[in-house]
Amino acid sequence: MGQTIGFWIRLASPCWLLVVLYLASVSIAFCHEGHGRKAGTAAVEATETIGSALVLPTIEGPKPWSSKPVLDDPQRFSIAILTDRTGGHRPGVWMKAVERVNWLRPDFVVSVGDLIEGYTEDESEIQSQWAEFLGFIDQLQMKFFFVAGNHDVTNPTMHRIWREKFGKEWYSFDYKGVHFVCLLSEDPTARLGDEQLEWLNQDLQSHRDARWTLVFLHKPLWTYAESELAAGNPDPTNWKRVEAILAERPHTVFAGHVHHYVQYQRNSQQYYSLATTGGSSRLRGIPYGEFDHITWLTMEQDGPRVANLLLDGIQPANVVTEESIEGFREFLAEVRIEVEPLLVSDNELGRGEIRLTVANQYQSAVAFEGTIHGLPLVGLDMKSQTIQMNIGAGETLRQVIPFSMKEPVDLQRFRLTSLTAKVVSQQEKPLTAEWTIPVVIDREYQIFSSTPTIDGDLQDWTATWWETDPSPILAGSVENWNGPADGSFKIAASYDDEHMYFAVVVEDEKVIDGDQFTIAMDPRALLDRLERNRLGRETVAIVVQPPSSESRQECSVNGIGRGSQLNLRAFGRRTRSGYELECSVPLRNLIAAQGADWTSVQLGARLTDVDSAEERPVDVLWRASEIPTENRAFAHAIRK
């Protein structure tokens, strides 16, 4: 592509000179008629020239034009950048953007990936999705450059189809002295591989004389790298190596993926994480960086000028900066909404209270409005499901909202209960924030203090066992699950001053390589878990490989997450119907999060079962999702 564009530049340059000379030769026709001059040599001598083709008459006194220059630099050009279309696409938005790009007439268009939904190995479906997207691109009236996102190259099949349709997954080209670099952030996942890095180094070395370098990739890998380095881990993305390669040249970087916009200052240059052009978004507006947009780049001699064209408006490049979003995040952080979990010891609930606390540590008063959703409506007796409060700066207000049912209701019917809350600051330029907060109405699981011997013998376990349902939650290749004998388990837990202990009895009629058992722990304090209801780096997952024989033996165990490389121990043995495990986990993370007087922890467990080397695994879940993402998917284990 770089050769093709360079070819057209070389042809176009002499033609451009001819056009300019032609315009200059007839420019006397534009002389101001009010001076009574006719077209001729005298008129040319009496004019001033600003720009290469504009000729203005000489006028004494005030002039009906400004003193600014004409922006006619032959090296100036403009391009449009389109960002994530998919990841839960909203129909019609991308084509709306295509229509507006055609109105704006950029030189060409560059993407940052996630062009199709992907995430399938069905080749006919992949081909169908690309056919649909290429139909959209056919409507563009200028050249479009493809960049691969995780939705576009999810698996080896999609990588192959990409190469068949578009060739290289990373490439570069040049335009008017600017070097364009399109990278693959999925090499293999959230990473640039060594081959790509070697190519990039050679490519940039051979383009040392570029007046500017523009880099496009899907994931903003600089944020991934910085998070890992801040946690004391090495950079798994290789982005720091990319920054080192780029450091000596003027450059700008564009990425997508996260579906919200932020302008960064990195490597003494501007880096951009773009929002969406039709991808999933709550579209809460500019303070959140959540909007559908086209990024417009005009290349000047001293670098690019960036503006954001919302599909219904235009915003500057610094519409959201690290500084401005920090101010908004301060507002979000200093208004805390807490909904105390309603935990019961039974599987049914007839009456209860929802306890709501709003603490306002922000600099101004705020108005709060919330609505409770998802309570079973049949037989519900509740004064109001809407709560309104005005909370002054520095104040904390609490409300108790009682409810009752005509007769006890199974807890499963309360699992979707939530609170939608809107908070507006009472200041000259109000800030508005909205939250959806789970209202946890669920079983509590008691854990008791005891210190079992971790040796693979479960005879000394007296704790209550928690079991998977006869029809459990499944993930992965669910068609490969043939009932509880093919994959089910029960689990028990206890603790002492230094460790949490787990015992597991697994039913699995065929134990082979690839089978494993995972226990996930979220050690954060209860209110922290409610405030940030998505699991983060604090979560620790313990992955245990099954024992290989009926003799008690030490099992291979690994930890995933911050501080997970602890002194983990696991023992087990095979049984006629599966296997048994015991493991111990130091309480270091839990005590660091809550203190030595910790009160609860949230747990989830997953049995990964493979019945043959050719089959994909099925996951049998207890109180956890396939890749745990929300606290409400975990069991509340209450210390007693």
Image: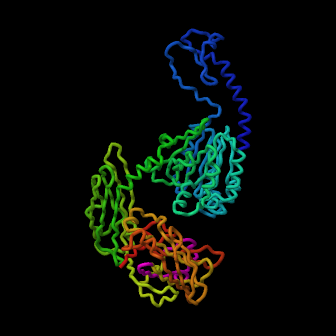
> Viewer-proximal residue, 93 or 538?
538
- Where residue 104 appears, as percent x and y from the top left, is 57, 37
Residue sitting at 54 percent across and 13 percent down?
A: 59
Residue sitting at 56 percent across and 12 percent down?
A: 33
Q: Which residues are magenta?
A: 473-498
Q: Verify whether residue 353 appears in magenta.
A: no
- Where residue 250 appears, as percent x and y from the top left, is 61, 43
Question: Would residue 285 be seen by someone viewing this image from the given angle?
Answer: no
- 298 displayed left or right of 369: right
In the orientation shown, which residue stands out farthest toward the top? 36
Which quadrant of the figure has residue 352? bottom left
> Viewer-proximal residue, 183 or 408?
183
76 up-or-down from 638: above or below: above
Residue sitting at 45 percent across and 78 percent down?
A: 499
- Where residue 322 appears, as percent x and y from the top left, is 47, 49
Say which quadrant the N terminus sits in.
Answer: top right
> Viewer-proximal residue, 499 or 398?
499
Say which quadrant the C terminus sits in.
Answer: bottom left
636 up-or-down from 510: above or below: above
- 327 displayed left or right of 252: left
- 565 displayed left or right of 449: right
149 up-or-down from 104: above or below: below
